[in-house]
Amino acid sequence: MNAEHDWITTPVTADLLRGFLDLERTAHGLLPHRLPARARRQIPDDQLAMAEAQPSGVRLAFRTRATAIELDTLPTKRAYRGLPAPADGVYDLLVDGRLAAQATVTGGNVRMIDMTAQSVELREGPAGTARFTDLPAGDKDVEIWLPHTEITELIALRTDAPVEPAPDSGRRVWLHHGSSISHGSNAAHPTAIWPALAAAQGGVELVNLGFGGSALLDPFTARAMRDTPADLISLKIGINVVNTDAMRLRAFTPAVHGFLDTIREGHPTTPLLVVSPILCPVQEDTPGPLAPDFDGGTLRFKATGDPAERAAGRLTLNIIRDELARIVKQRAADDPNLHHLDGRDLYGGTDYAELPLPDEVHPDSAGHRHIAEKFARLAFGDGGPFTTKTG
């Protein structure tokens, strides 16, 4: 702790947090989750257990006159055997909606993942502190967006002036579910992921259920969305179903219907946008599963399926796009608030030429920004399904 300030310690409680679905009390502090406890008990693999505990879109939100802020956390970081250690996750501090400062926390636990052996080793480490100083004087709304790539246990919040929960913004709540691209893979910092950028442009409050590798039409995720208050809902479906080779067309179609049916149980008339996959050349017409390719010391991905098996129901991105468009058109006859967006309208062939996918699957920060701008225009803009209706 820096001794040059007269610190006030404020307990981190639910009323200081946004973008989470559940909070777990741990031996160290408070751990935000993006799936409720009931859903977590049904998680079948370590990938989703890790992804839902990484706080993509989760942020502290409070009002204060403080010019110095410290946040003690215990991060659990992710590293891949055979690749350089990743950079520490970034904490974004926003003042009145604008990025004002950034910090990192060194140390912490490390999950060492061996993608070839499909094994994980946990190496324990110490807690640390994200520090923000020289902030503007006077009353202000402050948000601290947690690293989207690190599990983050919140230990203590210290400020040099009192803190109170941020007032209700009055903005609509946008509940979004998707894959690692929605989670924020390859984005440089938490407010640079495309859902966060699109939410800022659309003037909405984000609840991000983008789960790396795990947008697989799981019923427990649908139930979590059904039970989460929201004014707007979007689903980005398809790429994980293909790259895990999780199901065939016969299973995919009823799974999509079931997912939508469950959400509609809790949100019968809420605007609901189904978004098909963005362009991903390695999977357009080649089934999964994906496999890591470490050629040259850089992680890239390649599809390993046989295109000839498409006739037997093996899924590709083009097949999934066609089926999602058909399903939404069929259901929209009785559900006028159900909408469809082809993911290639967010990122297509021209975009791939200008902003290539560094690992052949995930966009970089420039790609996230591009997708966000397209989504904001097509979804929140005039005539879009999330447009604020007037008159």
Image: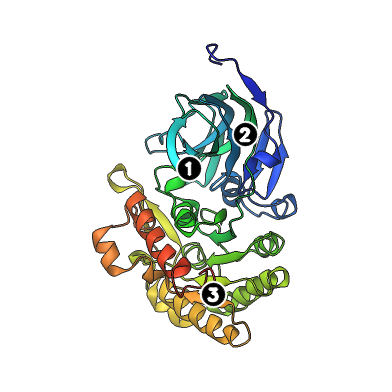
What residue is pinned by disc 3? 248
What residue is pinned by disc 2? 153
| First-in-chain label (2 vs 3) | 2
Query: How far separated are the C-alphas under marks 1 and 3?
Result: 28 Å
Q: Position of residue 245 (x, y in %)?
A: 50, 66
Query: How far separated are the C-alphas under marks 2 and 3?
Result: 38 Å
What residue is pinned by disc 1? 114
Check the image and tell me how it is coloured.
rainbow
Q: Secondary structure at mark 3?
A: loop
- Residue 70 visible: yes
Q: Quadrant of residue 224?
A: bottom right
Q: Residue at x 69, y 41 (%)?
A: 15
Q: Position of residue 256 (x, y in %)?
A: 60, 74
Q: Position of residue 188 (x, y in %)?
A: 39, 43
From the image, which quarter does the N terminus lie in?
A: top right
Q: Position of residue 238 (x, y in %)?
A: 49, 68
Q: Amino acid at mark 2?
A: Glu
Q: Nearer the viewer, mark 2 or mark 3?
A: 2
Q: Nearer the viewer, mark 2 or mark 1?
A: 2
